[in-house]
Image (cartoon, grey):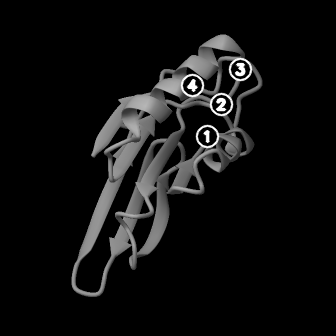
Amino acid sequence: FTSWNGRAINRHDGKLKRKKIQFLEQHLLPGSSIASFQEVHGNAFDLQLLAQRFEATHHVFFSAIEARATHRAPGGLITFIEKQWAQGACISASVLVPGRVLEIQIAWENNALHYFNVHTHEIY
């Protein structure tokens, strides 16, 4: 399992965003059955674009907070589940708190895993 605070990976444009995505691709996803990222920022469209880069090798689930008028969307979660590791599993996701708590349920024939991606900022 891997967990990382993305520090606004989608808020940045150009070179810094590419550098963060490259770090994710080269260092965080390889060898991780489940990789969770918090504070990725961006609305649902932004997170869908990020997810599409990895759909060949990973099941991707995300939750966004819609943008406020003053800046791009805060918070945001994205979870990657390696397809090879989860082969034969039934996978579903539930947004418990938009952009802050995402539950992933992974069920095989004889066992199951409930995984939570949580960013506790502003949750009281």
**Residue 25 seen by the camera:** yes
Separation of residues labelled 2 and 1 (CA atoms): 6 Å
Q: Nearer the viewer, residue 31 or 47?
A: 31
Residue type at mark 3?
Answer: His
Q: Which residue does the numbered mark 4 point to in the structure image? A: 9
Separation of residues labelled 4 and 2 (CA atoms): 12 Å
Disc 2 to disc 1: CB gap under 8 Å: yes
Percent position (x, y) of residue 122? 43, 31
Indicate the quadrant containing the C terminus: top left, top right, bottom left or bottom right: top left
First reached walking from the N terminus: tag 3 or tag 1: 1
Residue 71 is marked as 3
First reached walking from the N terminus: tag 3 or tag 4: 4
Position of 60 compared to 104: left or right? right
Q: Nearer the viewer, mark 4 or mark 2?
A: 4
Q: Quadrant of residue 4?
A: top left
Q: Which residue does the numbered mark 1 point to in the structure image? A: 65
Q: Nearer the viewer, mark 3 or mark 4?
A: 4
Position of 16 compared to 43: left or right? left
First reached walking from the N terminus: tag 1 or tag 4: 4
Separation of residues labelled 2 and 3 (CA atoms): 6 Å
